[in-house]
Amino acid sequence: MMGRSVVIGVTGASGAIYAKRLFDKLSMLEEVEVAVVFTGNGAQVFRYEMGEEAFRAVPFTQYNNNDFFAPFASGSSLFDTLIVAPCSMGALARIAGGLASDLISRTADVMLKERRTLILVPRETPLNLIHLQNMQRIVEAGGVVCPANPSFYSRPQTPADLADTVVDRVLQLAGFTVDTYRWKG
């Protein structure tokens, strides 16, 4: 697809590798504008799990999670997709509740109200009833909940290979063509 504008939200759940692999794969695509929003905890976890150098090397424009003047905070923007990866249960709850209290939850609210693509990638286990009910609310509102559950069909050899089984699926859900392993039975 061409002419896409995507926001990546990174929250404080463990699983920064999913955000890192999204950055890596999106940076290889042409004609895709990417913006990134880290929560405070998201930035801390990313630095801890991926390292300070990886944090400084994020190849896209970053916005502060309190910046409600970011272009994608408005439905009149051309941003068509928000992927929150990893998505903490707190962020998921704020989105499910329609709180729009920070830039990530406001952008999710915009995606839902404008009938655009919202994909949340929670990495939590086990799940309690509140988590499940919040996920149900997201899906009923038009969002997609794609848990960070890697697959093993492709026999991944490295942590990046394993994370890519989730990231490739997320990119497919977002409408991108991805060259990836296909189950053949």
Image: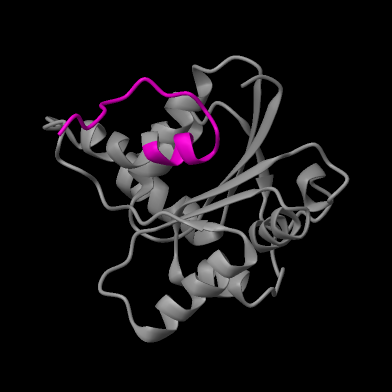
Among the 4 quarters of the image, the one containing residue 107: bottom right
Task: Tell me which colouring the rendered structure shows.
Answer: one colour
Comparing 18 with 131, the one in front is 131
Q: Give the residues drawn in magenta, as a range.
A: 169-185
Residue furthest to the right in view is 76
Q: How many marks?
A: 0
Give me the residue at 88% from left, 45% from top: 76
Q: Judge left or right: residue 108 versus residue 72.
A: left
Among the 4 quarters of the image, the one containing residue 19: top left
In the displayed structure, would residue 142 be above or below residue 35? below
Instruction: Give residue 106's position: percent from left, percent from top.
Output: 72, 61
Give me the residue at 37% from left, 43% from top: 18
Secondary structure mostly seen in magenta is: loop
Report the quarter where the N terminus lies.
top right
Q: Judge left or right: residue 46 versus residue 120.
A: left
Task: Say whether residue 52 is visible.
Answer: no
Residue furthest to the bottom in view is 129
Instruction: Give residue 171's position: percent from left, percent from top.
Output: 47, 35
Instruction: Give residue 126's position: percent from left, percent from top.
Output: 25, 74
Give me the residue at 76% from left, 54% from top: 67
Among the 4 quarters of the image, the one containing residue 3: top right
Task: Say whether residue 130 is visible.
Answer: yes
Comparing 161 with 61, the one in front is 161
Report the quarter where the C terminus lies.
top left
Q: Judge left or right: residue 112 versus residue 8.
A: right
In the displayed structure, would residue 78 be above or below residue 178? below
Q: Judge left or right: residue 110 versus residue 135.
A: right
Instruction: Give residue 136's position: percent from left, percent from top.
Output: 49, 73
Give me the residue at 48% from left, 31% from top: 23
- Asked if residue 176 lies in the magenta stretch, the reply is yes
- Asked if residue 11 lies in the magenta stretch, the reply is no
